[in-house]
Image (cartoon, grey):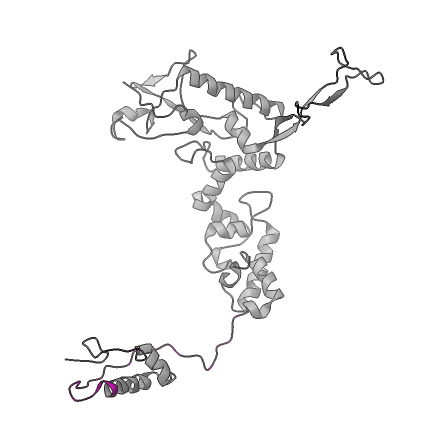
Amino acid sequence: MTLAINTTDAFATGTISNTGLGSRGNKSFATGFQGELIQISVKERLEIDARESEAKKTLLAQGIEEDFDGSPKGFPKTKVDFQRDKFGNLVLQNNLPVKQTVTSWYDIRHMIARNEFVPKIIDKLDKDGLPITNPLTGEKEQITAVDPDGNPILDRKVSIVPSLLEKSLFAAKKLKAIGIDSIAAPKYRPGTTIIEAYDQELKNNTQGITARELKKQGLTLSNFPRGTNIFDALKMVESESNQGVVDPEKAKNLVKDMALLRAEELFTLKRFKSFGGTTPSKAVELLNKDPEKYRPTPADTLFKPIWKTPPPIKVDLGKISSEQWRAAVIKNAQKANPAYTEEEIITKFGFDRVVNLGSGWYGRER
C-alpha cells in the first residue's frame, strides 16, 4: 500500500486528514487511526529526534523528571506518531501503520519554558592568548564577549517558568481525573497547551466538572448576573493560583455584590461592560463611584407609551381630497394614541414629505 505524503512533519504538527484511504468505516481502520497516514523520511526523523533530544536535555537539567517510559513525568501525551520497531521501521497492522500517542519534550518545553537572551561570558586572556587566573581566588577571570563592533554577544537560554510548571502539572492532574491523558490532535488543535486543554473541558462542562466546582461553594447560575454562561461564571470566582477551582472569598463577595446590584434593580452587567465592569465586583466599584451613571432611571410619567396601530378607516377617495383623507387618518390615529401630537403623527406617517395619492395609501379599502 502506498502512503500519502502531504507534510514532512506530522509528528511535530499533528496534521491528520483523510486522503485516498477509503471511507472511515473501512475495516482496514482496525488500528483506530482515522486520517491520512504520513510517512516521514529518515532525514526528517533524525531532525525531529535531535530537536527532541535538545529539549529533553534542557528540561532534565532544570528538574523535570523522566517517567518509566522516557516521557516527562506528570505530563499528558502531546503528539500523534507511528509505532516503530527497534530499527526505526513502521509497525504495520492490517497493512497500515499503527498510531500511538507520545509525550514530546519539545512540546513541554514550549508550554512551561521561555527563551531569554543573556550576555555570553568567556575567559579573559592575556597577550599570549592564555586564560588569566585571579591570584586571590584561583578562579579564571571572565568577561562579556563582544562582536567586532563592540556590541555584547547574546546567548539564548531556556528557563522554566515556575508558575507555568505548577499550573501545567495541576491542569494535567485535573485532566487525568476526567479520563483525559492525551492532548494530541485531532481531539485538540495542534499546539494546544495543557492549561488551554483543561480550560476547553471546563467550557464544555465535561462530566459536570464546572458545575461541580461551583456547587462546592454553594453556587449555581442563579447567583450570577442574568445571561452568564457556566464557564464565565466559574472564571468570575476562580482562584488566582488553581485553575478551575472556586476561591471561597471570591464566592462570598459575589453573593454580596449581586445582592447589592439587584437591590438597585440591576440584574445584568450590560450597563457596566463597556466601562470595564465585567464582574459583579467591578460593577459595584463603578456603581459606587458614579451611582447616577449606572443606576436605572425611574419611569418618566411623560414618556411616550408604545405606539398602537390605529383601527382601519373607510373613506371614499373619489369624494374627498388628499388633504381631507390625510386629516382623517391623523384624527383616527390620535384616538388610539392620545399621547402623540399631531406633528409626531404626521412625521410617523410620512405626511411631512411630498407624496402622491396611490394604491399604497394608508387606510384605503377597495
Q: Which residues are magenta?
A: 296-323
Residue at the spot 62% in from the left edge and 27% down from the top edge:
157
Left or right: 214, with 320 as reference point:
right
Residue 311 seen in this snapshot: yes
Q: Position of residue 306 (x, y in %)?
A: 37, 76
Q: Quadrant of the C terminus?
A: bottom left
Residue 228 forms part of the magenta stretch:
no
**Quadrant where the N terminus is found in the figure:** top left
Q: Is residue 321 magenta?
A: yes
Between 27 and 40, which is closer to the camera in this rendering? 40
The image shows a total of numbered marks equal to 0
Q: From the top left corner, tell me how far across and down residue 40 is, in percent.
A: 39, 20
Using the rendered view, name the quadrant where residue 3 is placed.
top left
- Name the residue: 52% across, 23% down: 71
Closer to the camera in the image, 325 or 275? 325
Does residue 107 appear to the left or right of 326 in the view shown? Answer: right
> Residue drawn 58% across and 25% down?
59
Residue that appears at 21% across and 87% down: 321
Q: Is residue 17 above or below residue 359?
A: above
